[in-house]
Image (cartoon, grey):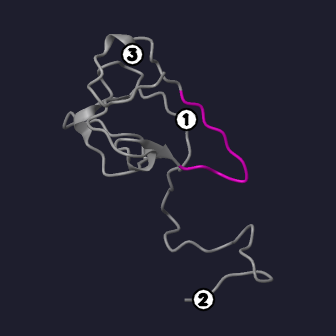
Amino acid sequence: MKRIEVYGAVPAELEMSSTHPDYVYTPLVSSDDFNYEPDKQGQISLNPVWQWNHEPDFVGVSFQERPGYLRIRILDTCDGVLKVRNSPTQRTMGPACEGILKVDVSDIHKVPIPQGNIALA
């Protein structure tokens, strides 16, 4: 493998020829309003700009329960934020980026919280 560096550092820009010149690349960063339509098989897939921090468990995920929202239910507890399942993430672009997350917790007081679980306060 050939190392690519300029004066011992990774270059800020790199020009390369494509091995697939006719391929149209999908952007890796985008906004998302979560208004998805089912495909021919009735399935809904999260926009490809999103990634899951762990293998998702779609039992707790809904795009249709409240249109325009990604609803994620907690299925179990864990001992740290890095182990939380069903956490979507999106790639960041440098040198600076910003993300806005809107969370509706207006009805959280109506949901029974099992013993030992922690809710946002």
Report the residue marked by disc 3.
Answer: 108
Q: Are marks 1 and 3 in contact (CB under 8 Å)?
A: no
51 within the magenta span = no
What kind of element bears circle 3? helix
Looking at the image, residue 70 sits to the left or right of residue 7; the answer is left
Please, what is the three-letter code of the amino acid marked with disc 2?
A: Lys
**N-terminal-most mark, 1 or 3:** 1
Judge the density around disc 1: few (<14), some (14-19), many (≥20) Cα neighbours within 10 Å. Answer: few
Distance between the alpha carbons at the discs numbered 2 and 1: 36 Å
**Can you tell which quarter of the image residue 61 is in?**
top left
Find the distance from the CA under tag 1 to the CA under tag 3. Answer: 26 Å
Q: Is residue 106 above or below residue 43?
A: above
Query: Sequence order check: which comes first, mark 3 or mark 2?
Result: 2
**Disc 2 designates what residue?**
2
Residue 31 numbered tag: 1
Say whether residue 95 is left or right of residue 2.
right
Q: Amino acid at mark 1?
A: Ser
Tag count: 3
Q: Which residue is rendered at x = 37% and y = 19% of the image?
A: 67
Q: Nearer the viewer, residue 51 or 77?
A: 77
Q: Residue at x 42, y 22 (%)?
A: 68
Residue displayed at 75% across by 67% down: 12
Residue 113, numbered circle: none
| Mark 2 element type | loop
Residue 101: image location, x then y, percent:
54, 30
| Dot placed on the residue nearer the N-terminal end, 2 or 1 | 2
Magenta stretch bounds: 91-101
